[in-house]
Every structure is written in structure tokens, then in C-alpha cells.
Image (cartoon, grey):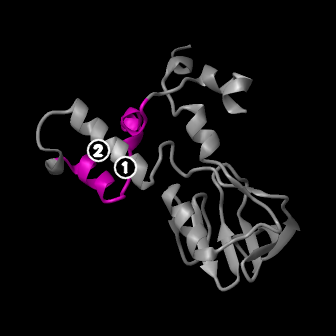
Amino acid sequence: MGTLLHRIAPPTWMVDAVPTLKAGDHFIPGEQIERWIERGYQRVPQVALPGEIALRGDICDVFPMGSPRPMRIELFGNTIESIRWFDPENQRSAEPAHYIAQIPAKEFPTDEAGIRTFRHGWRSNFEGQPAQCPIYQSVSDRQFPAGLEYYIPLFFESMGTFFDYLSSNKLS
């Protein structure tokens, strides 16, 4: 029962942080890669694990968080021509996917606004020189060490609960 009462990211952040992409959408590779990186994804040469993205010419591979396998976006100019599931072992495309939900790779915002909120929250809650604290410095440098989830309240003005996600009016 105690787990249900833990504070988590507010549902409004999660809903706002999950845009979708589908065939026919406008797609500028450099800008889209930056959006994924702001959501905590890591750019790699070849996608193999959740939270990774790779760009090779007119193909963008992404392994969305919560997805059973990675997806391949095939571009024609700046338009998504198709989205297909693919096998990370042999890199072969499989059946089409209808859309990609861009679920954040972290439980907290990793963009500039999220980092600003974290820094302000840190200075409001802890005494001393923040620049001398490794966690504060890591987040300031856009590095998110293991265990940072304990500091999630510093990334938000207010937190939510599991029950907030059950209310249909919060998510619509």
C-alpha cells in the first residue's frame, strides 16, 4: 500500500512529454534527435537498447522506452515515409508500426527547463555550495547518475501520485 502513495512525476508532464510521430509527419532529423536527447535518449552508432537513437542518412532508428523492440523511421526528404519495427540483431526491418510514442527515457525532465528547476530546488532545499556537490554538478552538466530518481521532487514544482494517473480529466 505504501508504494501507491509515493510521489511521482505529475501526469501533465508525462502527457506533455509524449508526442507521437507517424508516417506523413514533417521530420527534420537534427531537430528530432535533439528532442530525443532532451528526453534523456542517448545517441549511439547502432540501436540495441531502450532509450537509444541512431541516425544514418535517411534512416533514423529509435528504441522507445516501454517498447518491446526498436523502430526504424525511413525518410523521404523531411517527411516520414514509413515507420517499421526492426530486429536489432540483424538490423532487418519487419512489419509496419502505426506510430512512435516518444516516451521520455527518464522519470524526470532532462531538458534545460528541467535542469533549471532542479538547480533552483536544490538551492532551496540544501545548504552549502551546490557547485561542490557531485550530484548537482552532474545534473548541471546534463549527466544523470544512477540513483538520481531520489531527487525527482527537485525537477518539478509539484508531484503527482499513482491515483492522479487514474483520473481521466487530468490526462485529456
Q: Is residue 94 magenta?
A: no
Decide which of 51, 141 is in the foreground and name it: 141
Q: Which mark is residue 69?
A: none
Q: Is residue 115 placed above or below 98 in the rendered structure?
A: above
Residue that badge 1 annotates:
115
Per the model, the C-alpha gap separating discs 2 and 1 is 6 Å
**Count of numbered circles in the view:** 2
Q: Secondary structure at mark 2?
A: helix
Q: Please name the residue that numbered disc 2 is placed on.
A: 119
Left or right of 50, for residue 75: right
- The outermost residue toward the left is 128
Amino acid carrying label 2: it is Arg
Judge from the rendering whether residue 24 lies leftward or rightward of residue 62; answer left or right: right
- As drawn, the residue found furthest toward the bottom would be 57
Compared across the picture, whether 93 is left or right of 126 comes to right
* Residue 46 pos. (x, y %): 60, 76
The kind of residue on which mark 1 rests is: Ile
Residue in the picture at 49% in, 22% down: 6
> Regarding mark 1 in the picture, which secondary structure is present there?
helix
- Closer to the camera in the image, 72 or 26: 26
Which residue is depicted at the point 57% across and 50% down?
104
Q: Main secondary structure of the magenta part?
A: helix
Q: Are marks 2 and 1 in contact (CB under 8 Å)?
A: yes
The residue range painted magenta reads 133-157
Query: Residue 45, image x and y in percent?
Result: 55, 78
The crowd level at tag 1 (other Cα within 10 Å; few <14, some 14-19, many 20+) is: many
Q: Position of residue 99 (x, y in %)?
A: 79, 58
* Vertical side of 60 occupied by 156: above or below: above
Quarter in which the N terminus is drawn: top right
Side of 76 where 19 appears, left or right:
left
The answer to which image quadrant residue 76 occupies is bottom right
**Can you say which quadrant of the picture contains the C terminus?**
top right
